[in-house]
Image (tube, rainbow, N blue to C red):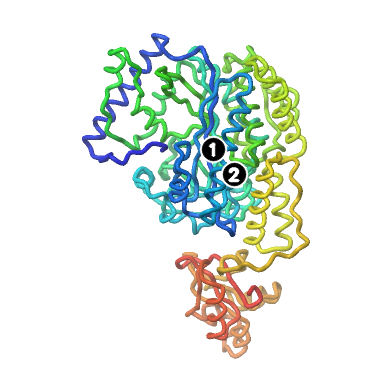
Amino acid sequence: MGEHISKSKFDQAERKAFVKHLIDDIKALELMLDQNLIESDVVRIGAEQELCLVDEGYRPAGDAIELLKAIDDSHFTTELANYNIEINLDPFKLQDDCFEKVEKQLMELLDKAHAKAEGLGMKIILTGILPTISKNELGIDFMTPIPRYHKLNEVLTKCRGDHFSLKIRGVDELTLRHDSVLFEACNTSFQLHLQIPQEDFIPSYNWGQAIAGPVLGVCSNSPLLMGRELWKETRIALFQQSLDTRKWSHALKEQVARVGFGNHWQKESVAEIFKEDISTHRILLTKPIHHNSLEVLENGAIPKLEALNLYNGTVYRWNRPCYGVGGGKPHLRIENRYIPSGPSVLDEMANFAFWVGLMVGRPKEFDYMPSVMDFKEAKLNFIKTAISGRQTVLSWLGKTVTLKKLILNKFLPISRAGLLAHGIQQNTIDKLLGIIAERVQKGTGAEWQIKNFRGLKSELKTDSALVKLTKAIYTNQRMNVPVHEWPSIQRKAKPKDNYEWVGQLMSTKLIKLYENDYANLAVSIMEWNNIHHIPVENEKGELSGLLTWSHIQALDKHKHKEDALVSDIMINKVVTVQPRTKIETAKKLMMDYQIGSLPVCVGSHLVGIISKVDI
């Protein structure tokens, strides 16, 4: 997805040519592997930093294109949504002070972005999922106006054949349908790259899969989505469902998700992984390619494998194999895509060093993972830690162990040894791995968010709590202090009212009635819950009426009181508002119609209710 395809026609002729190039790219890669042309005498690290843009009220700000123009730096690029941008950091050799170099460059680029963003009335936040993002910012008008994104949305929607469905259950549950891939835009990550020698690629890749669950658990930072407390790393479920092109059917059939962990250990070469993906997932995007990779290779040059790289960018393995060319030499990388952005740059650098150390410090006993661990054990660990984070109880080599013990007793020593073997400075190792040790004992970014969100919710409306939480994340982040040292949010001072829309004030946990409910049941429900108005839905789940206490009082005059249904006494013509209706408008409607509440709807579906008391 990270490549401009503005000159693409997306017609059959281009697709036919693209398929030929894709097949030839695989052949060219296999030839390079056979001839040992892949660079294997150096190890480099790199990273991609995804950012959220917010306005002065800490809500998504859709001005990425304007900001990128102001920054004017090739390290920065667009993302799917116009309230996200990405920084592509330079690669550095894994040696000496490489992590200090990465941190220095990242901080300089972030400072540059912060300065330009402030000039445009925006702020920049690093967080796995922006707490204040809402359904409103998932409309197609928030998609970055670049052809490749709109084409990607078009083809994914066509493949899906239906709206995208989201269902994630944690402490709360979020169930939603949407007509575009913009659910994906809720995710922001800190993607890590590690160059791997050709002969060690498969052992390294399998080891990367094995350690993914425990690493994810100690790095989790995405517990909230649209005011719901879901998984400790909700991005894992959200990303898979947001780009899920599988078709639902009555038949029980095996279908592989486009976003996923994988289903088995790899055995052959990196080319086999690419072949498996091409065999499993449809080609989504094409572009004109002017140089045949086999011909380039025959002429003594190194091909870029453009078709393979474009295709690989539309298959979202959490550990993604990558091919690239740098300094005229081809190389292979593993891209770690599961680490979230934030909580601070220092936390991110600790995550980076921890993962890299683990990867390069792999003990010999794990050179052939199929002999020591069942793949489903690794996959289950990944899912469990995405749900439970630091509190996860894992299965490691057939034994039950807490994440805390596994990290402290096994993984940190492996990581330390790996970093030392590559000449990383002792003080750097102590500092960065010390942060991981403290975090695994004291709490992750996900836990900090949940603890503070629950506290804020006890005093504030959900929307206000989310805004205050996001503001605190921004403030702590700017201090560049690791999350285990972040203070709790002070709640003594009641915030100044800053409500603009009905959606910020409405009640969402509603008691509802149905048209065919008996009226005497409605009476009891209203009395039990001390409420004076209840919305009524039909069998399709659409708002069809409103029942108020005045209607209940009129029930005494009904001839057949015991047989009366809600539909007999409810009001059918209901005055409604939308989540983005201004508060002043809702207040005026209540005064004009002399009513005490207004149902809040999206289309014909009820999503909340706002009363005089709320206002």
**For the N terminus, which image quadrant?**
top left
- Comparing 423 with 319, the one in front is 423
**Residue at x 66% of width, y 36% of height:** 347
Q: Which quadrant: the C terminus?
A: bottom right
Can you tell which mark lies on residue 115?
Answer: none
Look at the numbered discs 1 and 2 and tell me whether their residues touch, using CB distance below 8 Å.
Answer: yes
Which residue is disc 1 drawn over?
A: 49
At mark 2, the secondary structure is loop
In the displayed structure, would residue 388 be above or below residue 23?
A: below
| Quadrant position of residue 492 | bottom right
Residue identified by numbered label 2: 126
Asked if residue 229 lies left or right of residue 298, the reply is: right
Task: List the single residue furthest toward the bottom.
Answer: 557
Residue 386 image-quadrant placement = top right
Earlier residue among tags 1 and 2: 1
Kindly state the secondary structure of the residue where label 1 is placed. Answer: strand
Callout 2, which amino acid?
Answer: Leu
